[in-house]
Image (cartoon, rainbow, N blue to C red):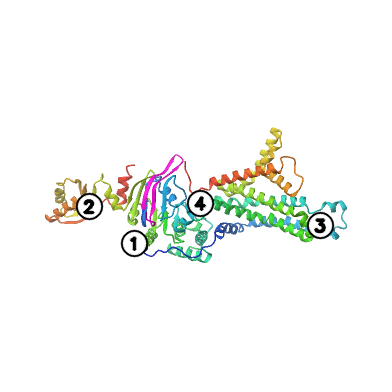
Amino acid sequence: MAVYKRGYRRYRGPLTGPWERFMVLPRHAWGRLYQQRLVILLTVLAMVWPVLCAGFIYLTNHAELLQGLDKEFRQFIQVDGRFFSIFMYVQAGFAVFLAALAGPGLIAPDLANNALPLYFSRPLTRWSYALARLIVLVGMLSVVTWIPGLILFGLQVGLAGGWWFWSNWTLGAGMIAGFVLWLLVLSLVAMASSAYVKWRVVAGAVSLAFFFILTGVAEMINNVFRVNWGHVIDPAWAVNQVWCALLGVAPPEGPGAVPSALALAVLMVLLAAVIERRLRPVEIVT
Amino acid sequence: MSASAVVFEEVSKFYGDVLGVNLVTLNIPPGITSLVGPNGSGKTTLMNLMTGLIHPDHGRILMRGISPRDPESLMRITGYATQYDTAPRWATGFTFITTGLRLYGYGRAEAEEKAWKALERLGLTEAATRKVAAYSKGMRQRVRLAQAIAHDPELLVLDEPLNGLDPLVRAETIDLFRAWAAEGKHVILSSHVLQEVDIISDQVVLIANGMIMAEGTIRDVRDEIEEHPSQYFVHCRDASGVAALLFGEDHITEIRLHDDGKGLLVMTRDRERFARALGRIALDGHPIDGVVPADENVDALYEYLIGGE
């Protein structure tokens, strides 16, 4: 058609790579999240415990400072699996609250604004959108979980020497793997509640309540049926079971790490399906 | 099949048991095309199919030679503005548009330059750094359009793009549509304001109950509707004399005299014979001041094709 030749030229200039494009959404979301005072406050508070743990590591590695202490107590304060598991429990708690605070603002506003068609009419798939949102949460929660954990591990290696690393590297790997598992569960729960509840406060409450309700249901199953496998539907309990296995700590009584990990995998698949169902580019009326 | 056309081949889309569109076949050339139809007729479904947001259950779509199943390529050439207020309320107009452009893969400097250009074209330069939440309805509509055109697409799909615009901005926006169409781009829009469609469209697609009722230029579509006689306003000083002469023609079905006696509305089944008859009447000493088609507009087409639904 003659009109077609009248002057339009397609853009032929350089384009950024897929990874940089993909990271546009997380970068914007992080920028917005760290503008919230409550998020900053909670992040700073979450750093107190790692600082105390760092002091503990320093202390355990300076025998001269422990001279006046009781021998049994000196044997008790060791940087081992138990130390890292206690560190992880505290940081995991902060992560729950941070996820409940930050998660609801990720998807709910896009659904309320009918903004999904806008995202998906760009070179962005549903899965890359969901992954970008997941990365926002995992990234933010990493700051208070495995990153300080890794720093503590590094500090211990630095103070104790290479021999400690070679005999305890599984603690570092287990801690990172354990945290990643917990962050995935937390992030998926926060995203699912954000995808279904429009109001941010309510969505935050729902993602907190999710854990309490499942703990209650698990207890109910155990008591009604006089079993202990009900624990596997309690994500916090199941994650703890996996952590104990990863860190070589004695686990609580109940189903082992493998059934717990399987239960967590099923939970994550269900949450992903719930999110996928909600992230439709157009509303479909049937 | 032209690579510069929007082509639908027997496209059907069902939402469960609910019909979206059924066996739609279209061939839309570049220019301004309006999708016209009542609420729920399938206009937005067609637009969602064009932009690959949903896929057909049956049939094939090609957007200027690109399948919507290849979103990476399609989105490079497509700009889409939905009918909703999609801009996040925390964002400024400028942030909203640059973020979109970064998603397309433009570098920061390129994205900012393109965003300013788009904002300037839509008259939003001064409001660019204000939050979208503080925008009026018309400004939000304009920022939606700005994000759709910012990457200079060759195919614009705009759902109700003129809603909420004041008359001045509306006229400027229509001029923009024309400028884009003149560059050889596709501007496909939906509108409920038929008078507006009439003014701006190079071609129309009339849709009802998920089926295409007509497609083409307004004149061509009107020509195809044989069951409705064509209507003409005839301006003349001797209206009753002309009417009397016209009544002798067997293709004339109805004549209505104007109250002022200086014109008449004539309905004919044969436009060519009507033109010849008018010529004869004029030569017989009954001056004809002008003849204007009365139903070569979207309003009439809508009434004929969809109004009875």
Q: Earlier in the sequence, mark 3 or mark 4?
A: 3
Q: Amino acid at mark 2?
A: Phe
Q: Who comes first in sequence, dot 3 or dot 1? A: 1
Q: Chain of mark 3?
A: A
Amino acid of disc 1: Ala
SS under mark 3: helix
Q: Which residue is mark 2?
A: B233
Q: Chain of mark 4?
A: A
Residue B211 screen position, x and y as percent: 37, 44
Q: Is residue A97 visible?
A: yes
Labels 3, 1: front one: 1
Separation of marks 3 and 2 at Cα, in angstroms = 101 Å
Residue for badge 1:
A2
Q: Nearer the viewer, residue A205 or B214?
A: B214
Q: Which residues are magenta?
A: B1-27
Please name which of the two marks, 4 or 2, marks the residue nearer to the observer.
Answer: 4
Seen in the picture, residue B14 relative to A120 is either above or below; the reply is: above
Residue holding disc 3: A60
Chain for mark 2? Answer: B
Q: CA distance from mark 3 to mark 1?
A: 82 Å
Which callout, 1 or 4, points at the residue further toward the start of the chain?
Answer: 1
* Callout 1 secondary element: helix
